Image: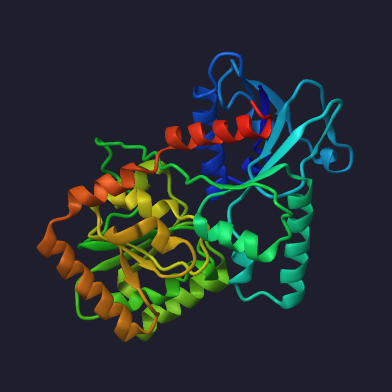
Amino acid sequence: MNIIFDCERMKHPYTGLFEYCTQLGRALKAAAGTGNEMSFYIPPEYKNYFGSDSQYHIHLPVHKFIPLRVKQVDIWHSSNARPAFVKSVRKMKRIITVHDLNFLYEKSSQIKINRYLKALQNSADRADAIITISKYAKTDIVNHLKLNGKPVSVIYNGCNVLEFPAYDTPVYRPAAPFLFSIGTVVPKKNFHVLPCLLKNNGYELIIAGQGKDGYVQKIVEEAKKHNVEDRVKLTGPVKNEDKYWYLKNCSAFLFPSVAEGFGIPPIEAMHFGKPVFLSTKTSLPEIGGQYAYYFNDFEPENICKAFETGMNHYAQTGQESLIIKHAGQFNWEKSAGEYWEVYKSVLQI
């Protein structure tokens, strides 16, 4: 089989899609096996990103109008649901990975929702198979698209945590025990509900990730409302070493997102055996399972009660090893093997 993995979205670093392309691309290459060839459609700045022994097709802006032409390819696998920038001289199968339909749960206008659904439907119409990263995302696709019997597979993301045991110089070193969260600092991540957790205790709250000024200000205003602004720290994007340090040393990990197709950060925290607190929205209960704690709503009194109850349960039950074991089931080697099985089924091998 000749597979091209479309990593065009890697042009946006510090995003979930960049990490997805990186980890899955490496695992797919490692799992290719004899007689199979994995090549990558990738922005020019990342040529040789998957090794000099791989083949690359360079993404150029002009491909939006004049598609890339390829000869020997069996499957074009797009890492997202955007239209493929390619034409083949022979019959080529197309697979798309749909990560989420988050636009359904954000505060979007119906016009915007309809536009997104139309674009997604067009991509689905052109695909020979669809892959989703959670059962929740699959349910959304089945409920909102016309699939006409097209196969939809669920393949969970993996989670490879990079470790730096000797690293001890985080971009910000907290002065007290701290709670941690990470992600693009935008409204759907719901970080502004967290500062209330610092009331009547000595915790600091560290939120890492690229932020939009308007939403960052909302988090600051919430912190001021609860008189804890001096203990809420927004670091901006952090390197892997800093993320490792914060995950390893935090007292708990918080992820109150209301729109999530999967949610790798909670799994990263569970890798360290940390108590993880999630919202009950979209796919997060599916990922955290019985080894996470949940915010059923975002009223400050209820959030604080859920946090206190969860931390007490964690301290009393000593389930750190069970949390680590749960995180271990999400690995990219397993994911890559399942992707190759989909490739075979599409080609009827």
Lateral position of residue 104 relative to residue 147, left or right: left
Q: How many marks?
A: 0
Residue situated in front as seen by the camera: 241 or 23: 23
Lateral position of residue 301 relative to residue 142, left or right: left
Q: Quadrant of the N terminus?
A: top right
Please state the horizontal and vertical placement of residue 290, each as a whole percent of the image. Answer: 29, 61
Tell me: residue 53, above or below residue 330: above
| Residue at image location 59% in from the left, 17% down from the top | 52
Residue situated in front as seen by the camera: 56 or 309: 309
Q: Quadrant of residue 200?
A: bottom left
Residue 262 makes an appearance in the image: yes
Please state the horizontal and vertical placement of residue 153, each as a whole percent of the image. Answer: 57, 46
Q: Quadrant of the C terminus?
A: top right
Tell me, what colour scheme is on the image?
Answer: rainbow
Please state the horizontal and vertical placement of residue 54, each as a whole percent of the image. Answer: 61, 19
Residue situated in front as seen by the camera: 131 or 151: 151
Lateral position of residue 194 relative to residue 342, left or right: left
Q: For the view shown, which residue lies furthest in the left direction?
A: 316
Q: In which quarter of the image is residue 328?
A: top left
Please state the horizontal and vertical placement of residue 305, each as a whole percent of the image. Answer: 25, 80
| Residue at image location 39% in from the left, 80% down from the top | 297
Q: Quadrant of residue 207?
A: bottom left
Lateral position of residue 279 relative to residue 25, left or right: left
Residue 15 makes an appearance in the image: no
| Residue at image location 50% in from the left, 33% down from the top | 336
